[in-house]
Amino acid sequence: MRINNYVKVDTLAEGFELLQKENSLIIGGGAWLKLTNKDIDSVIDISAVGLNEIIDKDDEIEIGAMVSLRQIETSEIISKQFNGILSNAVGKIMGIPIRNIATIGGSIMGKYSFSDVLTPLLVMDVSLIFYNYGEISLEEFMQIKKFQKDILTKIVIKKEQGKGYFHKLAKTSLDFAVINVAISKGDTFKIAIGARPSVSTKCYKAMEYINEFKVITNEVIEDTVEIAIEETKFGTSSRASSEYRADVAKAYIIRGLKEVFSNEG
């Protein structure tokens, strides 16, 4: 990878204009920049435009796109949502030096297959605010293969009472995830699986099934898990086989469903 120009902008308008040029890229913290293989003509630094705050509002939390993962990890505001599912997840990402650099905006826009950020966000009610496009749900954004060239400015999390669960498997604390699972229970159950090793995805059929029941028995949980594993595509990489990933995900989903359901009661 080769970078020809580095530009630090003072306004979003300036950054957006530069972004429209060929081979230009917005830089967040730059923690994952080395994963980009292609040459980049211009790297655009938006750290000076004021997107580094977490704002607590009546019914939602606004997170600036340049907020670091360490800020997320240590935020009392975010730790109150689904018993800290997002804080706990980002707290398991490599070491503190990396979490001080990596931003939530960069972690979302990269749609990285190893992401421990996207999986818990998918089981929350999350919207993304872009400079030009405006608002779009995270769920819809994840389904768009190639999004237009735009600047993510805010991540908005709707406040909701409920319980959350996140667990990941990695070979070491400084390694990328082999598999991760997130589950939340507010008004409904939500289930997501990441590091498959493809990008995180929700288990729609499993969610539809379990949310039909008012009484959650062990049989319902077992059936839900089987549906979730069946509908999710797992792959093989240097870190693990598809069969191993599916087996671990199955165990995590069983544990997570029981945990959020028992905590709710």
Image (cartoon, rainbow, N blue to C red):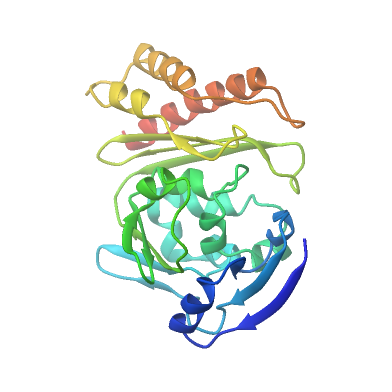
Q: Is residue 96 left or right of residue 106?
A: right
Q: Is residue 210 left or right of residue 63?
A: left
Q: Residue at x 41, y 42 (%)?
A: 143
For residue 58, above or below residue 114: below
For residue 140, above or below residue 32: above
- Asked whether the viewer can see residue 27, the reply is no
For residue 72, above or below residue 221: below
Using the image as rendered, state which of residue 83 and residue 194 is in the foreground. 194
Extreme residue in the bottom direction? 10
Using the image as rendered, state which of residue 27 and residue 213 is in the foreground. 27
- Horizontal and vertical percent position of residue 141: 40, 50
Looking at the rendered image, the quarter that the N terminus falls into is: bottom right
Q: Is residue 91 left or right of residue 204?
A: right
- Horizontal and vertical percent position of residue 46: 55, 78
Q: Residue at x 44, y 49 (%)?
A: 121
Using the image as rendered, state which of residue 113 and residue 148 is in the foreground. 148
Using the image as rendered, state which of residue 60 and residue 101 is in the foreground. 101
- Horizontal and vertical percent position of residue 3: 74, 70
Count numbered badges in the picture.
0
